[in-house]
């Protein structure tokens, strides 16, 4: 028996370090770790000890005998990975640097503005040094950002990463200042030697087509925050409960999350009766932004008989050499008794949202008119416009997470991102550049 990873990599590396036979890759120090969508257990090297299962902070590793039909592609993907990257010598391709020890030992206090994954990973990196204390500041009354408010309701295991955050919160030197806004002149940051901004990406991108301001048009992230009962997110689409058909513009993970939620609605949170969701992408399948684990999950719903998924690839056939397209090509033609239907329609450009007092349809460039009671735009976020070098905007001012790199990468990508930003902060600390007057940090970069 072997074990199988069934979720995107959280980049915590706990499973890699726990494995006694070094059979989980890519590992820290190897190309791709921290940026890859997945890590994989080598089925030829796994000794079935279960150490990785205990170590995984999100419960993503299971014995291959426990895989549901919808999860079985994860085992096939692991085999495919090790055929391409055998790791036969089990030697890392790069050496992991030893822990940094500061020459500067004076007490330092750092403010991290934003209590989501990026901010907490940054706090964790800072707290490796006993002379540094951290206050994590957030306008919301509860922490963990999109790890709590942006996770799809049927991805409950992903929320287990908050257990890792709770360990960070228990470290000496950690403090919270929740329900606290940081505004010019507020004085909140006056007593800190440095500030790391972890405030996320800019606002959601709009469609920039006529009719997008009609009632019934809503952003995917706003909808996700609402169904997770985020206290800072009001109802983004009044009348949502009456929707029967929906169109989603965008083909990333958020778009697929919303499509599943509208059809399945676990717990009756959304309260819709949507029977069909059409997901639109302007380009072809090769350019789809969704990740491999999301495709496996979607295919799994069809395999398990819950949702019928249809693919309209546009002008080109699905490419079997690409794992994501190969999985889509293998979808069952029909799913009798399915709760609803999701259509992935590629090479489809929306040109107008039509309706009088409420959205009624989406018009496409080819003349097609798709009826819709709800239109969701999930095409990313506006760039923050922050200029930085390895997370440094100026000595004493830093950015991390989506505020730094834009709305790209999942929860795990924030770990490597935080390591880079904190390294820049520590360089400035040892160069004597911190603590030169907190008032200049008060404005959001």
Image: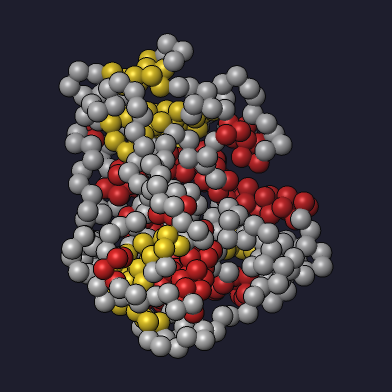
**Residue 83 in view in this figure:** yes
Residue at 45% x, 62% y is 392
Q: How is the image coloured?
A: secondary structure
Q: Is residue 175 left or right of residue 84?
A: left
Measured along the vertical axis of the image, is residue 201 above or below residue 417?
above
Location of residue 54 in the rendering, given as x and y in whole percent from the top left corner: 54, 74
Give how far across and how far down residue 302 sits, in percent. 51, 38
Front in this rendered view, residue 287 or 390? 390
Q: Position of residue 34 (x, y in %)?
A: 58, 60
The quadrant in which residue 204 appears is top left
Determine whether 209 is above or below 429 in the image: above
Residue at 57% in and 34% down: 287
Q: Residue furthest right?
A: 89
Q: Which residue shows up at 57% across the image and 72% down it?
A: 14
Q: Could you tell whether 46 is left or right of 178 in the image?
A: right
User: Dividing the image into 4 quarters, which one contains the C terminus?
Assistant: bottom left
Depth order, front residue of 422/363: 422
* Image quadrant assignment for residue 350: top left
Give residue 127's position: percent from left, percent from top: 43, 79
């Amino acid at each position: 028996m072997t074990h199988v990873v069934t979720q995107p990599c959280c980049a915590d590396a706990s499973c890699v370090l726990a494995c006694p036979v070094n059979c989980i890759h890519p590992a820290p120090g190897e190309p791709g770790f921290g940026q890859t969508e997945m890590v994989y257990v080598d089925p030829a090297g796994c000794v079935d000890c279960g150490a990785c299962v205990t170590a995984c902070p999100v419960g993503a590793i299971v014995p291959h005998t426990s895989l549901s039909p919808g999860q079985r592609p994860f085992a096939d993907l692991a085999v495919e990975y090790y055929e391409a990257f055998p790791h036969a010598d089990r030697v890392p391709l790069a050496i992991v640097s030893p822990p940094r020890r500061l020459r500067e030992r004076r007490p330092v206090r750092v403010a991290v503005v934003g209590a989501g994954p990026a901010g907490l990973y940054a706090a964790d990196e800072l707290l490796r040094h006993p002379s540094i204390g951290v206050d994590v500041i957030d306008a919301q009354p509860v922490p963990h950002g999109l790890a709590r408010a942006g996770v799809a309701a049927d991805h409950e295991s992903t929320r287990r990463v908050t257990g890792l955050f709770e360990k960070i919160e228990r470290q000496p030197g950690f403090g919270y200042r929740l329900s606290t806004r940081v505004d010019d002149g507020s004085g909140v940051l006056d007593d800190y030697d440095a500030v790391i901004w972890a405030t996320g990406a800019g606002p959601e991108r709009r469609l920039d087509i006529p009719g997008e301001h009609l009632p019934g048009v809503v952003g995917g992230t706003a909808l996700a925050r609402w169904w997770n009962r985020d206290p800072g997110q009001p109802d983004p689409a009044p009348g949502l409960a009456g929707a029967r058909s929906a169109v989603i513009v965008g083909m990333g993970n958020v778009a697929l999350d919303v499509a599943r939620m509208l059809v399945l609605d676990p717990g009756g949170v959304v309260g819709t009766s949507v029977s069909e969701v059409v997901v639109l992408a302007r380009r072809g399948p090769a350019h789809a932004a969704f990740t491999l684990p999301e495709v496996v999950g979607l295919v799994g719903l069809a395999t398990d008989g819950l949702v019928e998924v249809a693919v309209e690839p546009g002008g080109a056939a699905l490419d079997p050499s690409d794992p994501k397209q190969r999985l889509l090509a293998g979808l069952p033609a029909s799913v009798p008794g399915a709760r609803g239907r999701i259509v992935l329609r590629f090479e489809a450009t929306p040109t107008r949202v039509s309706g009088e007092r409420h959205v009624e349809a989406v018009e496409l460039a080819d003349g097609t008119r798709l009826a819709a009671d709800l239109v969701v735009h999930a095409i990313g976020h506006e760039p923050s416009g922050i200029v930085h070098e390895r997370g440094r905007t100026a000595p004493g001012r830093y950015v991390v997470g989506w505020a730094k790199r834009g709305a790209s990468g999942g929860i795990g990508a924030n770990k490597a991102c935080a390591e880079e930003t904190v390294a820049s902060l520590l360089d400035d600390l040892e160069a004597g550049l911190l603590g030169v007057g907190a008032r200049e940090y008060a404005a959001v970069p």
